[in-house]
Amino acid sequence: MQTETTATGGLAQHAPGTHLREYETIFLLRPDLAEDLVDKIVERMRGIVLRDGGKVIKVENWGKKKTAYEVKRNYRAIFIRFLYLGGTRAVAEFERNLRMTDDVLKYQSVKIADDVDVNARAVEPDVKLPGDPEMPERAPREAEASGFESFRERERDVEDEGIPPEVE
């Protein structure tokens, strides 16, 4: 089915009865990115969906979170969730741009629904969550054990004093 869209003020106007697929893409950005660079990447991805005749439903910035495993030498990442309507061409272009962006660590796209009426699906406001609190660095093990002697050190002290270890 061919869709008729015209871009007006950043929003695509769709002909009545237009149906598209609904997709969700979650991507991870480098944890050291500044807020303005994150916003720039999000706006570029929003423009790609609109340019290909899609409609952005919701963008969620989940903030900086710990990953389940190391991703490109990072244990933390900024998580972004895009919910949008579009065709397979829009998803392919979206993923192509994510792949070319050096700041993107990982991404995954999933089809949510097959046949969604574009005009019936309301646009939701964007959400920005704070993410996980930064964990303070742990003290080295030696500093944690200060004031406590190891078993071997106590054993040596007892031997130096000439007292058999069993008597103590």
Image (cartoon, helix red, strand yellow):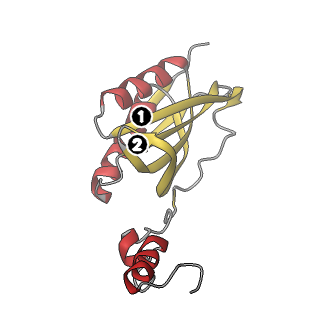
Residue drawn at point x = 48 percent, y = 27 percent? 53
Label 2 sits on a secondary structure element that is loop
Asked if 94 appears above or below 63 in the picture, the reply is above
* Image quarter (top left, top right, bottom left or bottom right) of the C terminus: bottom right
Label 1 sits on a secondary structure element that is strand
Q: x, y percentage for residue 112?
A: 68, 31
Amino acid bearing label 2 = Gly
The label shown at residue 111 is none
Amino acid bearing label 1 = Ala
Residue drawn at point x = 54 percent, y = 18 percent? 88
Q: Residues within 10 Å of mark 1 (few under 14, many from 20)?
A: few
Residue drawn at point x = 48 percent, y = 49 percent? 79
Q: How many marks?
A: 2
Foreground residue among 57 and 129: 129
Q: x, y percentage for residue 85?
A: 58, 32
Residue contact between numbered discs 2 and 1, judged by CB atoms under 8 Å: yes
Q: Which residue is labeled 2 in the image? A: 10
Asked if 24 appears above or below 166 in the picture, the reply is above
User: Does any portion of residue 137 appear in the rendered image?
Assistant: no
Foreground residue among 125 and 8: 125
- Judge from the rendering whether residue 77 lies leftward or rightward of residue 123; answer left or right: left
Asked if 140 appears above or below 62 in the picture, the reply is below
Indicate the quadrant where residue 87 lies: top right
Asked if 84 appears above or below 142 in the picture, the reply is above
Q: Residues within 10 Å of mark 2 (few under 14, many from 20)?
A: few
Q: Which residue is labeled 1 in the image? A: 7
Q: Mark 2 and mark 1: span between their CA atoms?
A: 6 Å
Foreground residue among 110 and 5: 110
Indicate the quadrant where residue 118 lies: top right
